[in-house]
Image (spheres, grey):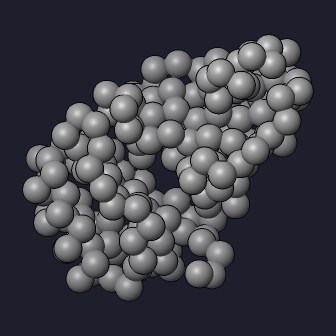
């Protein structure tokens, strides 16, 4: 697969409407499904990639077919390259990071938006984006870097979620304990 530059995401409160919306999205534009699954608590989550125009067309089609079930959506051109490894939880970091940052949201879509904004705002390494599985429908992203960079990144990401009215928490932990890395991350 070529490097992903544009993604679109749609989070719905209905599984059945999610399947219908995905079908409409795939019929509306030339996009690739990166993720399509049920998530906690009975929601449906879709992430697509393609050209900016195709992703916009697909998201419009999904929104039109799922009006009453839409929780959150986004079209994200020029997604930061660190988002996908963190979403796949395939990033390994040394347990001697100067700081870690946490952004927690009420939606998976806004968690992806937060992670992208954070990574673009400062020199941090995204190392986990957890979207709505076993979290009651919430999501969170984790990043590591200097204290200053984590503060800047967390602020930028949290601002993105705050605009949507979905922010749960924004935390920077200076000098995290080694046990935090081994037990919780």
Residue 177 x/y as whole percent: 79, 14
Counting labels gives 0
Q: Which of the pair 56/176 is nearer the observer? A: 176
Q: Nearer the viewer, residue 152 or 129?
A: 129
- For residue 38, above or below residue 20: above
Could one spot residue 164 in this view of the protein?
Answer: no
Image location (x, y in percent) of residue 121: 75, 42
On the question of residue 33 being in view, the answer is: yes
Residue 43 falls left or right of residue 127: left
Residue for point 47% across, 71% down: 49
Image quarter hosting the C terminus: top right
Q: Is residue 27 above or below residue 153?
A: below
Q: Residue at x 76, y 44 (%)?
A: 92
Q: Residue at x 57, y 28 (%)?
A: 103
Residue drawn at point x = 71 percent, y = 48 percent: 91
Decide which of 139, 152 is in the foreground and name it: 139
Residue 124, by quadrant, is top right
Which image quarter holds the N terminus? bottom right
Q: Quadrant of residue 20?
A: bottom left
What x and y, as percent, mark residue 81?
Answer: 70, 60
- What is the x, y in percent for residue 163? 46, 33
51 over 109 or under it: above or below: below
């Amino acid at each position: 697969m070529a490097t992903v530059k544009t993604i679109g995401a749609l989070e719905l409160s209905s599984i059945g409407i999610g399947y219908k919306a995905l079908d409409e999205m795939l019929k509306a534009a030339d996009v690739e499904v990166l993720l399509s699954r049920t998530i906690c608590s009975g929601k449906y989550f879709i992430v697509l990639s393609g050209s900016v125009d195709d992703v916009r067309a697909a998201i419009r089609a999904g929104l039109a077919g799922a009006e009453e079930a839409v929780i959150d959506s986004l079209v994200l051109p020029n997604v930061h390259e660190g988002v996908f490894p963190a979403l796949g939880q395939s990033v390994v970091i040394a347990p001697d990071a100067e700081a870690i940052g946490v952004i927690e949201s009420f939606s998976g879509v806004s968690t992806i938006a937060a992670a992208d904004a954070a990574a673009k705002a400062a020199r941090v390494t995204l190392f986990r984006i957890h979207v709505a599985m076993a979290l009651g429908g919430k999501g969170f992203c984790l990043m590591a870097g200097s204290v200053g960079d984590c503060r800047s990144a967390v602020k930028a990401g949290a601002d993105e979620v705050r605009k949507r009215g979905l922010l749960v928490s924004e935390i920077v932990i200076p000098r995290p304990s080694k046990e935090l890395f081994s037990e919780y991350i």
